[in-house]
Amino acid sequence: MMVISKTPYRVSFFGGGTDYPKWYLKKEGAVLSTTIDKYCYITCRTLPPFFTHKYRVVWSHIEHISAVSEILHPAVREGLRFLEFDNNEVGLEITHQGDLPARSGMGSSSSFAVGLINALMAYKGKMIGKHELAMKAIELEQSLLKENVGSQDQVAVAYGGLNLIRFYSDGEICVEPVTISSERISEFDSRLMLFYTGSSRFASEIANEVISNLEKKEKVLSQMYAMVDDAASILNGNGSLDDFGRMLHENWELKRSVSDVISNSTIDRIYKIGIESGALGGKLLGAGSAGFMLFYVPSEKQSDLKDALYNYLNVPFNFDRGGSSIVYYNSRW
């Protein structure tokens, strides 16, 4: 048997920080985000019975092991236990391939978790809805792996599309698709530019610092929370989308004030170059300190920005609407 899942990465615009349970279970939260056409692929297949090992896990390492407990990759190990594969009679091979580097602020760990669960459930012959898929991934990352992650990424990549995601104090999570014309979506998409800063970090470590500051930064987080609906209104309206870019700038200044670890001198310099070259706003994606920098740039200024940031990789992208899906399923060995 072989199953392949395809899960998009995400770009988060507004509301980051309010999706941590420590915040939203007391004060509620909201995030405006989209998925993009860069993907995480997880392949699960029955391991032919010709090997001394029972499990083969391929990621940045290649693991050949005889028991789930010996697996080094924490998400794979705990995911297999979570979905009761630890007593599986036949061998199993799990392979990961991604379009973007890990630990780069694009929600890669949650895309992996969602894609893994989706593939393993399909391997069992079970279909799983988007909401259940997101909630299982949240449980895997937050409860089983004890990672300092929020709840936005799992929901964003399970559902796919441009969404306003609300987090309620009773634990309920609701997804509201942003319904705008395809022409306005294309116009919005065309004004976003993504640059790779060439570095990576462990998001959980940075998030731990951010989480510890949430109560101290209540006023700032409340401002960032209020901006989510305002930004969605700009997209839903008929006015200039440039106001969205200016709001991104305001949001970035607020986000930087939450913790000293969110930015650094290199990120500040890249952002300064971006603004001086014509970007109206932008932000570092993810928990902070490294990864991908997003800019909102009017079309006539985009070549100037590419020239100014010539030593950083510009990654073209388009929005994705599909969410995590099973792209290959073969029940025969």
Image (cartoon, rainbow, N blue to C red):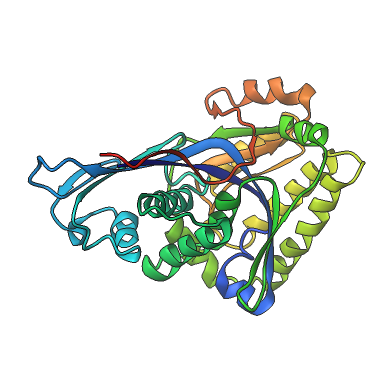
**How many numbered discs sit on the rendered protein?**
0
Which residue of the protein is positioned furthest toward the right in this rendering?
Answer: 238
Q: Can residue 127 be spotted in the picture?
A: yes
Q: Is residue 156 above or below residue 132?
A: above
Q: Can residue 266 be spotted in the picture?
A: no
Indicate the quadrant containing the C terminus: top left, top right, bottom left or bottom right: top left
Q: Is residue 106 above or below residue 18?
A: above
Residue 250 rendering spot, x and y as whole percentages = 76, 51
Indicate the quadrant containing the N terminus: top left, top right, bottom left or bottom right: top left
Which residue of the protein is positioned furthest toward the front in this rendering?
Answer: 332
Q: Quadrant of residue 82?
A: bottom left
Residue 17 rendering spot, x and y as whole percentages = 61, 63
Residue at image position (19%, 51%) is: 90
Q: Is residue 159 left or right of residue 123?
A: right
Judge by depth and name the residue closer to the eye, 107 or 288: 107
Judge by depth and name the residue closer to the eye, 294 or 4: 4
Residue at image position (30%, 59%) is: 80
Q: Is residue 223 left or right of residue 150?
A: right
Q: Is residue 284 left or right of residue 282?
A: left
Residue 231 rendering spot, x and y as whole percentages = 80, 52
Q: Is residue 294 left or right of residue 245?
A: left
Q: Is residue 30 above or below residue 118?
A: below
Residue at image position (56%, 72%) is: 21
